[in-house]
Image (cartoon, grey):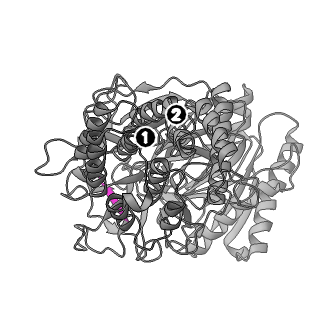
Amino acid sequence: MKNNTKDLLRNIFPNKQRLKKMLRLPYFPVVLIFLVLNQANAFSQKYSTKSSKAIKKFTQALEYYQQYQYSAAMTEAKSALKADSVFLEAYYLLSDIYGQTGDTGEKIRILRKAVSINSEYSNFAYLNLGRAELSVGQYFEAKTHLLEFEKRNKISEYTGELKKLIHSADFGIDALAKPVDFKPQNLGPAINTKYDEYHPSMTADEQTLIFTVGLPRPGIDTVIVQTDTQEDIFISRKDSSGLWAKAVQFGAPLNTNRNEGAHSVTADGSVLYFTACEDASGYNPHGLCLGRCDIYKTVRNGNQWLQPENCGPIINTKYKETQPNISPDGHSLYFVSDRPGGFGGLDIWRSSLSENGLWSKPVNLGDSVNTAADDVSPFVAADCRTLYFSSSGWEGLGRSDIFFSHKNADKSWSKAINLGFPINTYGEQTGLTLNTAGNRAYYAADYKGGYGRQDIYEFEMPEKLRPHASVYVTGIVYDSITKVRLLADFDIISLQTKDTLYRSNSNAQTGKFILILPLGEDYALNINKKGYLFASENFTLSSTEDSLFVKFLNIALLPIQNDASVVLKNIFFEFDKYELKPESSTELQKLYDFLQTNASLKIEIGGHTDNVGSKAHNNELSDMRAKAVYDDLIRRGIDKNRLSFKGYADKKPIASNNTPEGRATNRRTEFRVLK
């Protein structure tokens, strides 16, 4: 209230030197207002009215204002204006009361009225008008009034703020002149209610939507302010017709009679990260709480969610940790914190999952993302390289805008870019999420025609604002003989960089897995389970496959037994040659690890060709390709007595040689269990 009161009093007493001195008093603003009320004679104040009734009402309004009794202050100020309709001091006081109660429209109207009565009375009226107009997206009007104040301003303390405000007005004017395509659609009554719905999170297959709802606290009938609400997490799934089913609460043990929200779900929907905060007494219904707000994790077991667990002291501190976002590959946890080491306010941090399953020490995303203000609501797109977030610190259109940043080759982040108007407006935009394809976005907004307060909307993301296109790969892992679904470990490796992009497992009950892969790269998939031969697949996803957003795989694992064989699908050779390509190294390492784990196994490496070419050439080619793998394993340290190799040419086809696809399938390397 301090700066607001300064500006109010400068409006009311614009030319008094005594006022300038008293603005430096240590007990401001209570002492100052008391002196203003009781020492009017000392100021020799000459009001703009001669009506004693108007002055009396105005004085009473000031007393109520100082006591934060804004309704009573408003009544008295209006009475003062009824006694004298050109009483400037009453107009300025009333405008500030409207500002304190959040009625910016009325504040602007009253200030404009005061300026129209006497444009020379108060320079600060132009600053307050510019601030208010900027806050409701009236950028042209704001710039006009801010420039007028700049011309009149003689107080250096406002120079920095004024420069920033004028720059914001220019940004808004430019954004309005270059709108992006934006047609938001309400998700409807199955999702949205008369309460606030926000912070959507979605599984990779786009079949499950999880979001937060601000419900009335027990004993509260009407929600007026945030403290009247209790946050709970809700879930909805699409029905057979592709429509969202009626959302329901998660229920216990996730939801309690306290706040749970600001969450993120893994790509396969099996793990949920969320925020829970302690109350004034330090109580948190989920047990251990290391700070004001902590991040928790719950795991789905079949149709049940297990008791949430605190993510521990690496992630959580005595400070505030909130708004987790688990990356699509499951390797990084992004979250918001005001812990030391940031740039001010709330910053976005990232922790990586190590080989031993523990989170690393979080690192700040740096000044390309974080500012001295609040930077919140991180969401990493399916490509794992594009970050969307909300910020009140970057140049924007209002209180908080949505921005995006790309991860550079050196793992740093590019400078934040505003999504533009009308995705961003003069209001507060937060909590954006995208589908796997990156072409549909979801966020909460308070638009006219909604079902209540904030509703969740979806819209088509403009192409220039999209992340790199991705596909989601899904399937099941099962025993090839019994057909029983299996819990198995799998890795996804980039064949270009050799980086492991995913390390996860299939569901213990269903054998199902879901993972997300950006287009334009080649990948190796390796699936392992103790007692079984490992399986491998590879994907070549060209950037032209923009319509391909889903790939289904069923992985049959063979129990380890004599004569069982597996095709090594990520062993690569140049056409008609037998030198191993560098992309084969990942598969060769997996085969080495498998033999190390199963130290009693003896295997044969088999080379196979199609039926094109001479028998002699195919015999030699298949034999030399098998020997190349045999030699590599020996170089890695496998005892040669456990290995043999043989070329079979085209003698054992597994597909027809009458088609290009069939011939490609027959050109393969495999290993067979001998003992």
Location of residue 632 by image quarter? bottom right
Instruction: Give the quarter of the figure containing the N terminus.
Output: bottom left
Residue 387 on image: x %, y %: 60, 49
Residue 260 on image: x %, y %: 29, 56
Instruction: Give the quarter of the figure containing the C terminus.
Output: bottom right
Identity of the residue drawn at 51% across and 23% down: 183
Identify the disc placed on residue 48.
1
* Dominant SS type (magenta): strand
Which residue position holds label 2?
118
Q: Earlier in the sequence, mark 1 or mark 2?
A: 1
The boundaries of the magenta stretch are: 295-302
Kind of residue at disc 1: Ser
Q: Is residue 142 above or below residue 537?
A: above
Q: Secondary structure at mark 2?
A: loop
Q: Determine whether, in the image, residue 654 is placed left or right of residue 409.
A: left
Give whichever of 319, 397 is nearer the camera: 397
Q: Is residue 482 above or below residue 117?
A: below
Kind of residue at disc 2: Asn
Q: Are marks 1 and 2 in contact (CB under 8 Å)?
A: yes
Q: Inspect the magenta stretch and tell me whether residue 633 lies in it.
A: no
Can residue 180 be seen at all in this image of the molecule?
Answer: yes
Q: Determine whether, in the image, residue 132 is placed left or right of residue 485.
A: right
